[in-house]
Amino acid sequence: MNLKISKLAVPMGVVGIIMLLIVPVPVGFLDFLIAANILLALVILLTSMFVKKPLDFSVFPSMLLVATLFRLGLNVASTRLILGEAHAGQIIEAFGQVTVGGNIVIGSVVFLILVVIQFIVVTKGAERVAEVGARFTLDAMPGKQMAIDADLNAGLITDEQAKARRAEVSAEADFYGAMDGASKFVKGDAIAGIVILVINLVGGVVIGMAMHGMPIMEALSTYAILTIGDGLVTQIPALLMAVATGMIVTRSNAEADMGSTASNQLAQSRNALMIAGVAAIALALIPGMPKIPFLLIGAGLIFVSQRIKASQTAAAKAAEADAERPVEAAAETPEDLISKIRVQPIEILLSPDLVDLVTGASDDLLARVRGLRRKVGMDLGFVIPPVNARDSVELPPHTYVIRIAGVEAGRGEAPAGNVLALGDALDALPGTATMEPVFGLAGKWVPAAMAHSAQMTGATVIDRVSVVVTHLSSIVTANAARLLSREDVRVLTESVKEDSPSAVDELIPNLLSLAEVQRVLQGLLEEEVPINDLARIYEALTLRAKVSTDPEGLIEAARRALGPVPAIRHVDGSRLNVIMIEPGSSRRCWKACVRRRTAARSSWTRIASRPSSAPCSKARLPRRMKDAMWSLCAHR
């Protein structure tokens, strides 16, 4: 029943508003509707303050339209009563009497000031902010979509999470577009209020003198009070709605409501409070200045600043005490020592201030790494070893290090409380300039509270966990050959034997040992060729091993057996981007490859994307090509 009522509430309300434009309304019922209008605007304003992000109040544009139509309906109903009966209820008369205060001129000036504030300052500003917000949101939309696709391809998020994030990006664009249009209704409502004010005043004076026989001053006094009262009961809700519009379009995504966020951020600037308090006391010393207000405000600001300082000092001392507290060393067993000296295949070392990345939250580092292992396993054809994460007091602040088999393979920074912004217009944002660790893009670590502002400039915003996991994904892919152990090959072989026993029985151990098969698979992984189709690889190795067990020939045979698999993920539509090199350079490179006896150095040489693996890389190629480019093809 409640669900049915909620579905019918808005349509019935709109029909009722239309009836206001046609049917005369009793004075008592008009008072009720005016009170409801004021309270509705107040509820919407307070709701806009308590939401954490604009999309939490996505129905606001529609409510803004309905509320504007409601106010216009009330204007028509009140105008009918003012001009017809010279009376429009107690609320309108009370507002008019309080504002006029016995002097029509003063009351009119006060009312005009309110109208100017409403129309020129609040409404115009909210309209401009909504327009700019819609423009920047649409400009940032492609970057956000690309970031979602990149996270999905890197295994940082699941398909369901990607769909949810795409839906959120689309909803955000729709919301700001709707707000851009709805803000025009706010402006039109303010203009209509001014026109109705003039009509009520002029028409009321004319009707009072011509039809009711009032003297001009009596007619002016009567209808001025009613007109000002009517203007106030519509302009005050309109002002509240305009302020709510400005707040909702300037609200950035945050973890708390506006009041909590403002309190926390102001508390971080206790020096500003202290300086403001001293300035207030200094103003009190100026001759002629009222001393009590400035002294009270200055003392209050200084008191709050000192309280913030005391709480920060106490928190720092508590943290130091926890850090210096001695920890009882448990008796170490030989097994404990063995586990400590054992080299971890993949390890992430975190500086002490980055331990929050593994606190156990739903999107923490370890949870994202589990998704990465699944993604890399599906792409490369084997399950990478578990990732061990621990803190290291030897690392500088904000630093993490990724190790492969105990050797550092990469490091980066992920300062707490910040997000990484990538784009071209980052100069206006506060933060620390940096370099994205995977693609070498220029970026900046900005405070998390500025994430929405960074997106509005068209920048792509990446959280700290995504930065670390993307870096880890790149390093794991580049070192996949080192991570493929003999035990992994045995497990994979047993799995293939269940489905294709003949492919395994004929090859191992009759023609090749498990170690030789491992070497071949490592050669393929070194070239980033996936080994998912092991049955086909083993069949090709069986045919080649009967002729020769040379590792290079075995890798070449396996690669050819896979057909287009090595290149398919680099194809752009129906085109594979390659670079053709001069035949003389081709021969020199090939001879160098043969001399070094590197694995699988055939006509497909990865010079562009892996310069260190190419023995004759004299070409000046960028570290990361903008377009997908798979290989250098030599004429042979």
Image (cartoon, rainbow, N blue to C red):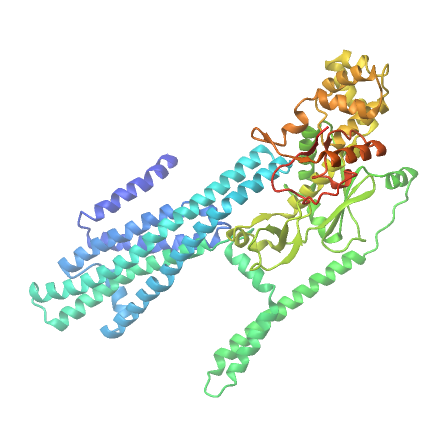
Q: Which residue does the image show at 75% across and 52% down from the upper left? A: 352
Asked whether 583 or 457 is in front, the reply is: 583
Whole-percent x and y of residue 562? 70, 22
Residue drawn where x is 65% and y is 68% of the image: 309
Residue 33 percent coordinates (x, y): 27, 52
Can you tell which quarter of the image residue 547 is in? top right
Relative to 261, is 18 above or below? above
Give the x, y percent position of residue 608.
Answer: 70, 39
Is residue 420 shown above or below 510?
below
Q: Quadrant of the N terminus?
A: top left
Q: Residue furthest front?
A: 584
* 191 lies above or below 552: below
Which residue lies at the image location 25% right of the left edge and 53% below the top edge? 74
Quadrant where the C terminus sits is: top right
Q: Is 77 left or right of 7, judged from the image as shown? A: left
Residues 281 and 351: in front is 351
